[in-house]
Image (spheres, rainbow, N blue to C red):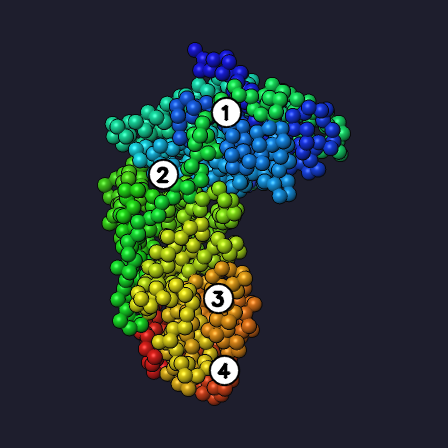
Amino acid sequence: MSTLDSPTLQRMHAYWRAANYLCVGQIYLRDNPLLREPLQLEHIKPMLLGHWGTTPGQNFIYVHLNRIIKQLDLDMIYISGPGHGGPAVVANTYLEGTYSEIYPQISQDEAGLKRLFTQFSWPGGIPSHASPECPGSIHEGGELGYSLSHAFGAVFDNPGLIVACVIGDGEAETGPLATAWHSNKFLSAATDGAVLPILHLNGYKIANPTVLARIARTELQQLLQGCGWAPHFVEGHEPERMHELMASTLDIVIGKIRQIQQQARQQRVLERPQWPMIVLASPKGWTGPKCADGVPIEGTFRAHQVPLSDPRTHPEHLKLLEQWLRSYHAEELFDGQGRLRTELAQLAPLGTRRMGANPHANGGALLRDLRMPEFRDYAVAVKQPGVAGIGDTRVLAPFLRDVVKLNSEPRNFRLFGPDETISNGLEAVFEATARQWEARTEPNDQYLANDGRVLEVLSEHQCEGWLEGYLLTGRHGLFNCYEAFIHIVDSMFNQHAKWLKVTAHLPWRRRIASLNYLLASHVWRQDHNGFTHQDPGFIDQVVNKKAEVVRVYLPPDANCLLSVVDHCLRSRHYVNVIIAGKHPAPQWLSMEQAVAHCTEGIGIWSWASNDQQADPDVVMACCGDVPTLETLAAVSLMRTHLPQLKVRVVNVVDLMKLQPPSEHPHGLSDREFDQMLTRDKPVIFAFHGYPWLIHRLTYRRTNHDNIHVRGYKEEGTITTPFDMTVLNDLDRFHLVMDAIDRLPQLGDRGIYLKQQLKAKLVEHRDYIHRHGEDMPEVRNWAWDAVYPAL
Ligand SMILES: Cc1ncc(C[n+]2csc(CCOP(=O)(O)OP(=O)(O)O)c2C)c(N)n1
């Protein structure tokens, strides 16, 4: 017996034709949207932009998902992996009515159709992808590879949600997507929702066949099965047969999803299920022109973008385009006003069951504040500056543990990381939860459970994609990672920051929780790993993005870290980058001082300065925990050996303070900047990252010419912590020498001290080579305005 009776099948086919028609219209037309007149050149856009190839397949999927949503009242959203098929999501959200509700000028009539067509890939209109402007989208899909990770992120802790995730067979060749199949080892059938991957095997990328289309179907089946999936193939090109096959397959796979969930939820079956998925093998550019210019188009790579050329330069294509458009018989699909005929419109689900109107795809609308513990309760007691600390992230860990605990019932906070939660000093979170793990366990495993709040997989791409999906659907999270390897997701960060920028200006999109990176195990303390693990360049990458979206914090000690993390977890619609150390390190500020300092983001540390009664001779500025330590050691040296010198210490927690306020909302006013860093005195700036960044951020400041920056200059290896700073000229001795070089008034006193400091550096080298650790005077140094004898 067939799944679809004949009238239903015909109506679904008509709906598909309507969507296809709207997509061709978006790519080509600026006028005559219902082809009431013969097609003329003036009806055609001056620039033909967009991607046809993936679009009819996605339209086909969408109409079938609509049927099953309606039939079973499913809570479902749609992710378009090949998001370049933007016309498809626009067309379908228009047909279901959501588009016109959000953008009333794109009305359900002929005038609205004309605007719908014209706005696509048009200046002042909408982009060609499944962009943020498109309702129902949480995934632009411009940069391929992240659809399946986003889909999983969206269903974690969303037990009622199904994400239908269309994956391009080209997209499936990317590293992130290839790994994302394994997300099923982290998904709880009991407490999470389900992902329905639909691998769209249309055979081609831009100009090449795809790998998965050119291996035997059995090999593809085995590959997917090996990744833990049960693939169902829907293959062919004859519409009638394909409609029936897709409908019956969807019935089976959704039935299977429900059965798996029921077994886990009611019968408490704990074995990892084999989740179903669909492989849709259909021609690329299905229903488009068969041939043009004597070569086949449909079912080939030539269908990828705009299959027929501009009739202004290829006059013979005008007829072909008109034939193609008329093949959908728009007159049977839209009424006299240009509105989708009622019997077709009824195929779409209603209200928030429409995939364009599902609130999960506008996550800010569902976002609830986290329940936050009082961060001050986790403070380190700092009676005087310089007391020994256990490692800043280790102080933070109990706070994060309690964030997990307090939000265990709303289930809206998770930690993500590539197997570094313990390594980054956050082990205390495992007092409250475990790592989510659905694969096999063995007796010696640690902290694994099938209901853990920590998601760890050794793929930074998955951590990032899952977290993004989680945030975009209205929840909160934090990604902890080694600083050097966060670069792996540079490009994903880019895409997310772009999404935030655009959505911030769409009033109907609600703001989501910020994406928080905690980069521990940073460049200066890679004692185990050396050069490969030393790279502070993620900050440089981040500050390229819009100031309204990015924030970078370098707390100098644990109390500042607590204050910063509390702030970031409460913030909205930013990317926050926090860089913190995990190794024992001195603590500088009491909690009260830390809160005041972090609130300002930059400040003079008067307890370390001696310029209260006079203008400073030199400003010693620092940003980052290790640079702060070296700066304070340098200051104590200067105050001991050059007591007449007036030294001011400035610490920066919020890097964006350095930019002028015209460039970043956090930017310090020029007046305050001049007051703090002076208009004309030398500034020795010890920075955590690459030095150029400080110049980039301060080049417009009055005193920029006098700012001399030390930072990481790509000198690294396995060595002692202090030697890392020496190799990069960021150590206390170099900092003092830098100051002397810029203070000619010191005369011979300065020259003699410099001589002694150079000798110190030689002594340091000899010592570490002989003993394998830093000199006792370095290891045991503690803040005092007086430095031990040289
Ligand atoms: C990471 C990335 N690399 C390259 C591209 C350029 N690109 C755009 S579409 C495309 C082919 C996509 O093929 P597929 O995923 O199969 O989509 P479809 O054939 O359905 O259009 C490529 C390579 C991209 N968008 N993203």
Q: Residue 117 location, x and y as percent?
A: 62, 33
Which residue occupies 62% across, 38% down? 119
Q: What kind of element bears circle 2?
A: loop
Query: Where does label 2 land, which residue?
Result: 156
Q: Are marks 4 and 1 in contact (CB under 8 Å)?
A: no
Circle 2: residue type: Phe
Query: Mark 3 or mark 2, which is nearer to you?
Result: 3
Quadrant (top left/top right/bottom left/bottom right) for the N terminus: top left
The circle on residue 668 is 3
Direction from residue 605 to residue 120 in the image, left or right: right
Measure how far apart labels 1 and 3 are at the Cα level: 53 Å
Quadrant (top left/top right/bottom left/bottom right) for the C terminus: bottom left
Direction from residue 465 to residue 425 in the image, left or right: left
Question: In which quadrant of the rendered view does residue 411 lie?
Answer: top left
Direction from residue 418 to residue 311 in the image, left or right: right
The circle on residue 63 is 1
Circle 4: residue type: Leu
Query: Where does label 4 land, which residue?
Result: 743
The circle on residue 355 is none
Q: Are marks 2 and 1 in contact (CB under 8 Å)?
A: no
Q: Residues within 10 Å of mark 1 (few under 14, many from 20)?
A: many
Which of disc 4 and disc 3 is earlier in sequence?
Answer: 3
The foreground one among 354 and 153 is 354
Which of disc 2 and disc 4 is earlier in sequence?
Answer: 2
Measure how far apart labels 3 and 4 are at the Cα level: 27 Å
Which residue occupies 68% across, 31% down? 31
